[in-house]
């Protein structure tokens, strides 16, 4: 009988995930007693902010704990902070958005905190078991969040679609992990990395890797595993959509990048061509189908597919340049996408989503703040300098070119050009199309507007001063 | 060591996986699809246990299998709640009845 | 064709103030954006911001003038982006070329801001107008002061954006919105080529620069010689396509005439004096690259001459006062491009400057007329305004004389220099085209003057009753621009006259000296005489047609109905583009969408559906909303992924 030895645990490493989990529990419990949505929102905000500060204080620490399965390094910290900040922005949006929807705040914020805890686990995981656990903690929370607006048909439908397809993808993930385990005898990424070179079961290993690409491809909404995205993004409450488009996708990439560049780094030649094709497809299909949309929320869903394609380009390029570019792009993408969904949320009201381009007519003059910020987000998503999106694309394509992926870079640039067509349609609607007269007063949306302005400011700041943020991404990636 | 070779067990897993896929794709009923998904998860589980049994270090794979069982329970709970919500709103749990979102 | 650049290390003066020139208007924009409900405040702060920028520009140029020849003022604000061997700073440079550009952009910009106080003062969204205008100034100054192509590109995109917003300023009118969209789309085509050229340039220079990727102008200048002619031609042509978009040349000029939908001060500032010259500036700035490729230069020259003639013929018959000026702008830009093509880069910039003076004057004058005529733009309904709007009349006349090339006025020197360089560079045919164009220019401009200011007022009673001279806030800018249109050309006299071509010498460190045949003075004098005679003939013809025998144009238009219709309808180019490019494009994209989204994926899904034996009817649409279809597509993808490994 083997003696069961508890491994030494570095509790600092689990501080971020511990704090968010406690926050989640507290919120669930408080939700039973506290009726005031705003109070609960503030508690979530403060909780996440405290966690973010605590996480930032861990900068410079590096350790691997839980028997080599959970890492505290700059890479994890980079993503932890990204999730927490995205979470804070989403909470700000929700504090306005939830009004009148009947969504129970305690449950909503609690699940939000758990989702973030799951993401943090994914970013820190150095073991496929832990990746899986993090992924599921996050996914199950988000399935419920997507259907949180129980009286809305489309919210229900989105939850069901997301759940069924997500669970379906989980099947592939588990099967893939099993095959990798069978071939290498390990779940830990460092052991896998040493074993991939001389495994006798190469076919099984490759099949496992392919299954993992499929499963991660689903989470980050890569073509052809993207079809759930538009429906789910459109149907979910807009704040949850923002969370899915930004934090969930970033978490997917956090695990994707760590597993593939760290664990399967030795197999780069085997998976890079496949990812090449997926990246090209994802960019192209996302952009082309976005052109056909008249619903802005749905268009943003396709746009988020296209942007996953750009990040995949960085992943294909791999190496320090590619990895850094991927992290930086995620940072850039997060703010502009959060902001764009924030504007969508701000223009809608309970029972009146106001999401089509026709609803955006003349908004630039009726709601100048929303007009200006949406202009910033759309131009940044297009990749117009000096906004953040330009710097992001620039680094991604430079990395691709440096590693010799010229054709992929050209496809990316062409796609960028295509994408301008549909982003600009929003601007044309807002500024060059006369809109209906304002009916009734616009509701006050202080929290929501704050979140939008914060996103806009970050989009401009990161674009004008990208060097500092690039340095952060670099530290993060090099700590792998 | 029993007389059953690893390949046979893996084959069982594969067949389970294929059956799971078939179920997911052909059942119109959301609960049916959910059952198909359970088959997928258990197909993977068979593999974990098999690999653990036939490799030197058994604990890892078995632990993972337990995690998967736990996850399957959690997913079933959430899934049934979502399906219940669907039933309340659409009065049907056929997945082709819920078509508010398309194109 | 092209002289050697100064080989000695250029003197670089470091400045801490250069960034203020673009950023002061940005501050003006921010104030205007925040105070959008306080137009009275904005009417003061916005012109003040431009005035401050003008003052800083003046003092910086004074520093530059005090330095030895070939010096430049430079400021590196901070490192913008760096990745491995790639490096880009946010940096500004003020050398001879950008000094000229910055001065006239801020100067003319200031006058137009002042004018706008009067012209737009009563518009309810005048604060928004000033906000856009300030933002435009910021972008334009970034464009001309940027020390590398990326900063230039930021400005390039920025001016474009402001231009679309301002064209569609009165967005309640569908036509205006459509014009804004058209400008945007056409410019995107040019911009794509520009970006490609930019990338190609950076990559082709890298080997010679030890792998360094840099778009710094000094870097480009230092390593351009390493480009092989083929690459240089491709780069130059891509950049040229970018320039044809922004500077309205064939084939991308179509957006500019429609852009007249914007308020008149915008037409003056953006669509005549400044933004449309960005393409000219860019080519002049990258003259070392263009000079490497004689083939590309040939294309530039021919394109310029063609555009000049083509647009001038259209201008002959237009009846909207702003449309005539718009086509005239396209034509004059053609002159500048022609000058670039024959290697006379400094001359092109000279014409950019003089054109800014007289064309801004003409547009503002037209604005004053429209203002006085209660919004009427049709010249056939005007007439006799000479006495009712004397200041407008006299300044407009001076502008007309300047553009027609009356001896001694600004346009005379710059236009004759272009004609002379064209001839001297060995392009007699292009010279002929340009001379004919100059004759047509005199004709259509005097036609405009005669129809507007002479004869009988043909407006209806209400309008006629209200005709009035514009307020001083509008006429004073006119007078200043008129003075500049008279004296602005004297900085660039022909070589050997008085102080000679000061302007050309000032720019020479940036643009190089074009080689000219010796004994040029006599030749230049003769060409000048021919051009001037023809211009007078053109003006005289207009006099005969529109004052002496006003029935004649009507008769002619009947007799030459085919030609007249062709010109009146602008050679049917818009219709041609619609039929040949736009319509097929729309069809293609609809088709693509249908094929990609419905037929192709559908077919794929159908096939698979058959394979699993499910009801085929279920799979009619790919994005059908049915979760199982998605699962099936997912599975299809998974099979493809696995097949990739099995086969590969």
Image: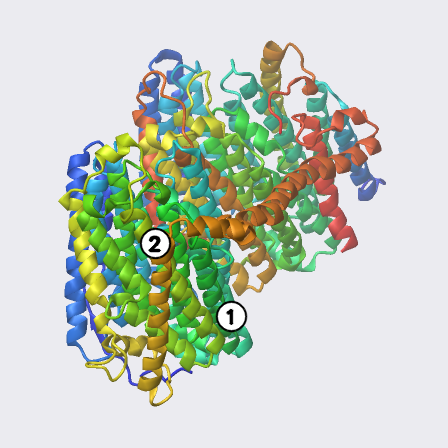
Q: Kindly indicate whether the residue at mark 2 contacts the one at mark 1 (C-beta within 8 angstroms).
A: no
Q: Position of residue C503 (x, y in %)?
A: 25, 74
Label 1 resides on the chain identified as C
Which quarter of the figure is the N terminus of chain C placed in? Answer: bottom left
Which residue occupies the foreground of this view, C491 or C324? C324
Reading the chain from its start, which is encountered first: label 1 or label 2? 1
Looking at the picture, tell me which residue is in the foreground, A336 or A49: A336
- Quadrant the C terminus of chain C occupies: bottom right
Distance from label 1 to label 2 (Cα)? 42 Å
Dot 1 falls on a residue whose secondary structure is helix
Query: Between B73 and A404, which is closer to the camera in this rendering?
Result: A404
**Which numbered circle lies on residue C548?**
2
In the picture of the structure, the residue carrying the numbered disc 1 is: C299
Horizontal and vertical percent for residue A110?
43, 24
Q: Residues within 10 Å of mark 2 (few under 14, many from 20)?
A: few
Residue C108 placement (x, y as % from top left):
23, 56
Question: Helix, strand, or loop for circle 2?
Answer: helix
Determine the residue positioned at 35% across, 26% down: A44
Whether residue C466 is visible:
yes
Q: Residues within 10 Å of mark 1 (few under 14, many from 20)?
A: some
Residue at x 62% of width, y 42% of height:
C589
- Residue that extends furthest to the right in the rendered view of this protein: B3
| Residue occupying the point 48% across, 44% down | A124
Subunit bearing disc 2: C
């Amino acid at each position: 009988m083997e003696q069961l030895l508890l491994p030494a645990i570095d509790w600092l490493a689990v501080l971020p995930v511990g704090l968010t989990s406690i926050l989640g529990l507290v919120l669930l419990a408080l939700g039973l007693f506290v009726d005031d949505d705003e109070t609960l929102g503030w508690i979530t905000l403060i909780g996440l902010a405290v966690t973010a500060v605590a996480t930032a204080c861990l900068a410079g620490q590096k350790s691997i704990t839980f028997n080599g399965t959970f890492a505290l390094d700059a890479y994890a910290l980079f993503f932890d902070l990204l999730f927490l900040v995205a979470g804070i922005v989403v909470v700000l949006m929700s504090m306005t958005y939830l009004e009148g929807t009947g969504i129970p705040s305690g449950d909503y914020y609690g699940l939000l905190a758990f989702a973030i805890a799951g993401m943090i686990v994914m970013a820190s995981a150095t073991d496929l078991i832990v990746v899986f656990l993090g992924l599921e903690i996050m996914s199950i929370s988000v399935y419920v969040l997507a259907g949180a607006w129980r009286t809305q048909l489309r919210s229900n439908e989105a939850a069901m679609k997301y759940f069924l397809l997500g669970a379906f993808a989980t099947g592939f993930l588990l099967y893939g992990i099993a095959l990798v385990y069978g071939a290498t005898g390990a779940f830990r990424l460092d052991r896998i990395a040493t074993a991939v070179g001389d495994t006798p079961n190469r076919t099984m290993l490759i099949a496992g890797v392919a299954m993992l690409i499929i499963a991660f491809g689903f989470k980050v909404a890569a073509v052809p595993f993207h079809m759930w995205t538009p429906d789910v993004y459109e149907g979910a409450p807009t704040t949850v959509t923002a969370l899915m488009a930004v934090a969930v996708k970033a978490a997917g990439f956090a695990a994707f990048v760590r597993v593939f560049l760290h664990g399967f780094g030795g197999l780069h030649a085997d998976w890079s061509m496949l990812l090449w094709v997926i990246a090209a497809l994802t960019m192209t299909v996302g952009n082309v189908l976005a052109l056909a949309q008249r619903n802005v929320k749905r268009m943003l869903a396709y746009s988020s597919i296209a942007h996953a394609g750009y990040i995949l380009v960085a992943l294909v390029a791999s190496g320090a340049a590619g990895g850094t570019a991927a992290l930086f792009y995620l940072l850039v993408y997060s703010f502009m996408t959060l902001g764009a969904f924030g504007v969508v949320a701000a223009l809608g009201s309970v029972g009146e989503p106001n999401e089509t381009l026709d609803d955006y007519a003349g908004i630039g003059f009726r709601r100048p703040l929303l007009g200006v910020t949406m202009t910033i987000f759309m131009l940044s998503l297009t990749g117009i300098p000096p906004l953040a999106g330009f710097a992001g694309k620039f680094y991604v394509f430079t990395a691709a070119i440096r590693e010799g992926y010229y054709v992929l870079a050209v496809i990316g640039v062409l796609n960028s050009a295509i994408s301008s067509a549909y982003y600009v349609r929003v601007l044309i609607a807002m500024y060059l199309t006369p809109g209906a007269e304002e009916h009734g007063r616009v509701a006050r949306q202080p929290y929501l507007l704050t979140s939008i302005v914060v996103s806009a400011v970050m989009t401009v700041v990161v674009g004008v001063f990208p060097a500092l943020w690039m340095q952060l991404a670099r530290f993060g990636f090099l700590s792998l | 060591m029993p007389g059953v070779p690893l390949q046979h067990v893996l084959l069982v897993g594969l067949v389970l996986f294929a059956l799971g896929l078939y179920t997911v794709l052909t059942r119109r009923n959301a609960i049916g699809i959910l059952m198909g998904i359970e088959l997928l998860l258990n197909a993977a589980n068979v593999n974990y246990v098999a690999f653990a049994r036939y490799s030197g270090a058994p604990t890892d794979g078995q632990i993972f299998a337990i995690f998967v069982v736990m996850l399957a329970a959690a997913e079933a709970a959430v899934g049934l709640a979502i399906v219940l919500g669907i039933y309340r709103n659409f009065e049907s749990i056929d997945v082709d009845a819920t078509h508010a979102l398309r194109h | 064709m092209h002289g050697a650049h100064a080989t000695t290390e250029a003197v670089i003066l470091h400045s801490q103030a250069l960034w203020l020139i673009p950023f002061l208007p940005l501050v003006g924009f921010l104030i205007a954006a925040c105070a959008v409900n306080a137009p009275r405040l904005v009417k003061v702060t916005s012109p003040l911001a431009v005035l401050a920028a003008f003052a800083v520009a003046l003092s910086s140029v004074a520093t530059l003038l005090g330095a030895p020849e070939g010096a430049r003022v430079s400021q590196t604000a901070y490192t913008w982006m760096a990745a491995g061997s790639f490096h880009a700073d946010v940096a500004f440079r003020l050398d001879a070329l950008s000094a000229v550009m910055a001065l006239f952009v801020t100067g003319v910009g200031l006058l137009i801001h002042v004018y706008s106080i009067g012209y737009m003062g009563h518009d309810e969204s005048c604060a928004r107008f000033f906000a856009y205008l300030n933002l435009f100034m910021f972008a334009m100054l970034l464009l001309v002061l940027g020390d590398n192509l990326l900063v230039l590109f930021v400005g390039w995109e920025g001016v474009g954006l402001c231009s679309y917003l301002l064209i569609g300023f009165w967005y309640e009118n569908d036509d205006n919105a459509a014009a804004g969209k058209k400008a945007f789309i056409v410019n995107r085509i040019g911009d794509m080529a520009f970006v490609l050229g930019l990338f190609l340039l950076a990559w082709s220079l890298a080997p010679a620069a030890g792998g360094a990727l840099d778009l710094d102008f000094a870097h480009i200048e230092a390593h351009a010689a390493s480009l092989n002619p083929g690459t240089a031609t491709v780069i130059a042509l891509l950049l040229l396509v970018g320039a044809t978009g922004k500077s309205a040349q064939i084939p991308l000029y179509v957006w500019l005439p429609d852009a007249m939908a914007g308020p008149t001060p915008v037409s003056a500032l953006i669509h005549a004096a400044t933004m449309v010259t960005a393409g000219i500036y860019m080519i002049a700035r990258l003259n070392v690259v263009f000079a490497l490729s004689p083939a590309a230069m040939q294309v530039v020259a021919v394109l310029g001459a063609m555009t000049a003639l083509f647009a001038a013929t259209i201008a002959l018959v237009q009846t909207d006062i702003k449309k005539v000026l718009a086509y005239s702008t396209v034509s004059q830009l053609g002159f500048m491009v022609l000058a670039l093509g024959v290697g006379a880069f400094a001359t092109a910039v000279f014409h950019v400057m003089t054109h800014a003076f007289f064309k801004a004057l003409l547009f503002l004058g037209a604005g004053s007329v429209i203002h006085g005529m209660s919004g009427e733009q049709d010249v056939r309904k005007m007439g006799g305004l000479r006495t009712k709007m004397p200041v407008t009349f006299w300044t407009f006349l001076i502008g007309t004389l300047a553009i027609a090339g009356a001896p001694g006025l600004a346009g005379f020197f710059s236009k004759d220099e272009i004609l002379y360089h064209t001839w001297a560079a060995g392009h007699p045919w292009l010279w002929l085209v340009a001379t004919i164009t100059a004759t047509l220019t005199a004709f259509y401009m005097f036609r405009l003057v005669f129809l507007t200011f002479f004869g009988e007022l043909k407006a209806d009673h209400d309008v006629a009753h209200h005709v009035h001279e514009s307020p001083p806030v509008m006429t004073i800018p006119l007078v200043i621009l008129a003075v500049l249109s008279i004296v602005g050309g004297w900085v660039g006299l022909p070589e050997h006259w008085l102080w000679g071509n000061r302007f050309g010498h000032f720019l020479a460190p940036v643009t190089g000296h074009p080689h000219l045949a010796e004994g040029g003075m006599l030749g230049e004098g003769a060409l000048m005489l021919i051009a001037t005679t023809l211009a007078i003939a053109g003006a005289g013809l207009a006099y005969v047609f529109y004052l002496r025998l006003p029935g004649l144009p009507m008769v002619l238009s009947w007799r030459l109905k085919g030609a007249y219709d062709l010109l009146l309808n602008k050679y049917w180019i818009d219709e041609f583009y619609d039929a040949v490019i736009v319509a097929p494009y729309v069809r293609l994209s609809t088709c693509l969408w249908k094929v990609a989204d419905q037929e192709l994926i559908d077919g794929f899904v159908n096939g698979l559906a058959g394979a699993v034996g499910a009801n085929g009817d279920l799979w009619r649409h790919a994005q059908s909303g049915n979760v199982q279809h998605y699962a099936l597509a997912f599975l299809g993808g998974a099979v493809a992924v696995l097949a990739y490994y099995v086969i590969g």
